[in-house]
Image: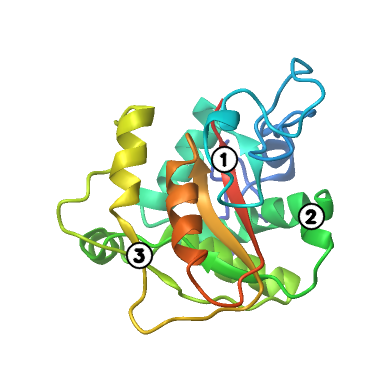
Amino acid sequence: MLDWLYPNTCELCGELSGATICPACLAGLERVPRPICLYCGAPTYGLETGTDRCRCCRVFPRVYDFARAALMRTPVTTELVHAFKYARASHLCVALAPLLANVWEQTPELREHGDWVLVPVPVERGRLMRRGYNQAEELARALGKLRGLRMLQLLQRVGTEYTSQTRLSARERQLNARQAYRLIPGITEAPPHLLLVDDVYTTGATARACAAALRRLSGVQKIGVLTLLRAE
């Protein structure tokens, strides 16, 4: 009776569906095309040769060990993430976390170790209260259930003057992120293999800032980054 009164529909096309996102719409989401930069995970379209780092990420220090993403940022995927992030649509994790799990199967660096610990990128406390949840934490928790991995809160986003990264230039993102992410006080050591989980990788400023903070922990050997979307 409830299914008849309130039928389940696909979040993207609105058609009746037993899934949050129907199989047709899920298959139509644009994946990150190969080949990719083996460091930052950006598609290189065959323009880079003889290196594991693309021209863009070569100018930055190697703070994390690798970054990968499931989807390209397009109008459709951006709308999907905005709903997940700002419209209290946390239920979308049911459909989004398997996309990250698929990337896992395609990434030798992730399959190399079975003891990865998932570390969600934190959000500022005020935004957390307004949204009701941290989208990166929701993704990490759902992925952890799929892969049988644990999640640890190791980072915090500090300062009330932190500016959202959304409308900043690449240089502004770097400066903004450096002062925003810190280790949670009292944490001095961590497991050897840490995987940062976030929703979008744009310039990599957030990933580098978080990884730099995690590098200060005793025992850390490798830091990976896994995101839902990858900007061009």
N-term-proximal mark, 3 vs 2: 2
Mark 2 lies on a secondary structure that is: helix
Q: Are marks 1 and 2 in contact (CB under 8 Å)?
A: no
Which image quarter: residue 125? bottom left
Judged left or right of residue 71, residue 201 is left
Mark 1 lies on a secondary structure that is: strand
Task: State the CA–CA distance, disc 3 to disc 2.
Answer: 26 Å
Instruction: Indicate which label's residue lies in the foreground, 1 or 2.
Output: 2
Residue 109: numbered disc: 2
Amino acid carrying label 3: it is: Arg
Task: State the CA–CA distance, disc 1 to disc 2.
Answer: 19 Å
Judge by depth and name the residue closer to the eye, 46 or 229: 46
Confirm whether residue 135 shows in the render.
yes
Amino acid carrying label 2: it is: Glu
Judge by depth and name the residue closer to the eye, 140 or 41: 41
| Residue at (30% x, 31% y) in the render | 168
Mark 3 lies on a secondary structure that is: strand
Residue 10 is situated, as x and y percent measured from the top left of the image, at: 59, 45
> Does residue 97 lie above or below 40 as drawn?
below
Residue behind mark 1: 229
Residue 182 is situated, as x and y percent measured from the top left of the image, at: 35, 64
Judged left or right of residue 89, residue 178 is left
Confirm whether residue 166 shows in the render.
no
Residue 25 is situated, as x and y percent measured from the top left of the image, at: 67, 37
Residue 182: numbered disc: 3
